[in-house]
Amino acid sequence: MLQASQLDRNTETTCVMINCESGSEGRIIDEIREIQGVKECVRTTGPHDILAIVESHTVESLKEIIENKIRKIPNVHATTTLVIATRF
């Protein structure tokens, strides 16, 4: 599991929660792990299927990762993004 000390303090860190087609989680995780800026990607239980931890230096690069890479993967239905506001 990713530790707080492993996150770059000079970048914005976000949690991207992903909903996808049942049965496609493994392939989607493999694709997301190949995206530059993705620090970790795991399968979850509950209302979301996958959680990706993403670091970006700008809002524009975060938007590029989410809108033009993650959301374009076949069988990804929706994403919810949480920006980490404070690190301890």
Image (cartoon, rainbow, N blue to C red):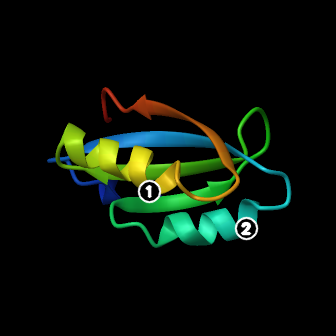
Judged from this view, the residue extending furthest toward the right is 23
Question: Is residue 86 depicted above or below 59 in this figure?
Answer: above
Secondary structure state at the residue bearing disc 1: helix
Residue under label 2: 26
Name the mark nearer the viewer: 1 or 2.
1
Which percent across, then down, holds residue 4? 37, 49
In the visual, does 43 lie left or right of 32? right
Whether the residues at callouts 1 and 2 have beta carbons within 8 Å, the answer is no
Amino acid under disc 1? Lys
Judged from this view, the residue extending furthest toward the top is 85
Identify which residue is drawn at 45% across, 51% down: 53
Which percent across, then down, holds residue 16? 50, 42
Which of the numbered marks, if any, corresponds to residue 87?
A: none
> Depth check: 21 or 7 in front?
21
Judged from this view, the residue extending furthest toward the left is 10
Which percent across, then down, holds residue 68? 40, 51
Secondary structure state at the residue bearing disc 2: helix
Looking at the rendering, which quadrant does residue 85 occupy? top left
In the visual, does 9 lie left or right of 85? left
Identify which residue is drawn at 24% across, 49% down: 61
Identify which residue is drawn at 85% across, 60% down: 23
Question: Is residue 47 depicted above or below 70 in this figure?
Answer: above
Which of the numbered marks, if any, corresponds to residue 69?
A: 1
How busy is the neighbourhood of tag 1: few (under 14 within 10 Å), some, or many (20 plus)?
few
Disc 1 or 2, which lies upstream in sequence? 2
